[in-house]
Image (cartoon, rainbow, N blue to C red):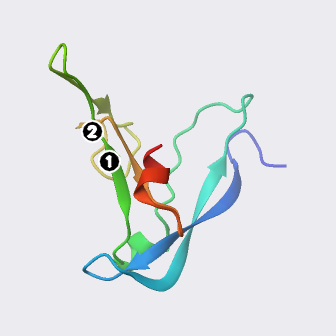
């Protein structure tokens, strides 16, 4: 059992893409923490092999815009993020897991 400061991990895979966005048939892992309702919310960064190796991989961005108020929902990135900590960012974003589509990930 993991301690409170060390979460249990599971592995997620990302498809490796060509420069034009085609799947190469390879996928690479990234370990992610399992969080449970009783687990405190710590900030863990797991960038994975595609980032380390500089591989092309897919991500999805979801922009939430209110037409009636002309407002765009932004979020502030956590201070412990390894890229752009503490700065404002789009409404929601994430990596696309191996085999998934952008629509599945966005939902």
Q: Position of residue 30 (x, y in %)?
A: 55, 66
Question: In percent of the image, x 72 and y 29: which residue is there?
Answer: 37
Question: In percent of the image, x 32 and y 83: which residue is there?
Answer: 18
> What element does badge 2 sit on?
loop
All told, the count of numbered labels is: 2
- Residue at label 2? 90
Q: Residue furthest right?
A: 1
Left or right relative to 38: residue 58: left
The label number, if any, that marks residue 80 in the structure image: none
Label 1, residues with CA under 10 Å away: few <14, some 14-19, many ≥20: some
- Residue at label 1? 61
Q: Position of residue 14 (x, y in %)?
A: 50, 69
Sequence-wise first label, 1 or 2: 1
Q: Residue furthest left?
A: 70
> What element does badge 1 sit on?
strand
Q: Quadrant of residue 66?
A: top left
Evaluate whether residue 74 shows in this view: yes
Say which of 6 and 41 sits in front. 41
Q: Position of residue 106 (x, y in %)?
A: 43, 46
Q: Residue furthest top?
A: 69
Q: Nearer the viewer, mark 1 or mark 2?
A: 1
Q: Is residue 81 above or below residue 49?
A: above
Q: Position of residue 55 (x, y in %)?
A: 36, 78
Q: Is residue 107 above or below residue 71?
A: below
- Asked if marks 1 and 2 touch (Cβ < 8 Å), the reply is yes
Q: Quadrant of residue 24?
A: bottom left
Evaluate whether residue 87 shows in this view: no
Q: Is residue 34 above or below residue 37?
A: below
Question: In percent of the image, x 32 and y 30: which residue is there?
Answer: 75
Say which of 71 and 83 sits in front. 71
Label 1 to label 2, Cα distance in Å? 7 Å
Question: In percent of the image, x 32 and y 34: which residue is there?
Answer: 91
């Amino acid at each position: 059992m993991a301690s409170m400061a060390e979460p249990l991990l599971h592995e997620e895979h990302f498809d490796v893409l060509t420069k034009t966005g085609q799947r190469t048939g390879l996928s690479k892992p990234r370990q992610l923490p399992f969080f449970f309702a009783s687990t405190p919310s710590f900030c863990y960064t797991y960038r994975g092999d595609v980032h380390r190796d500089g591989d092309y991989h897919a991500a999805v961005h979801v922009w939430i815009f209110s037409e009636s108020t002309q407002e765009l929902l932004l979020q502030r990135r956590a201070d412990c993020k390894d890229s752009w900590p503490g700065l404002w960012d789009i409404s929601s974003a994430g990596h696309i897991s191996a085999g998934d589509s952008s629509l599945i990930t966005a939902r």
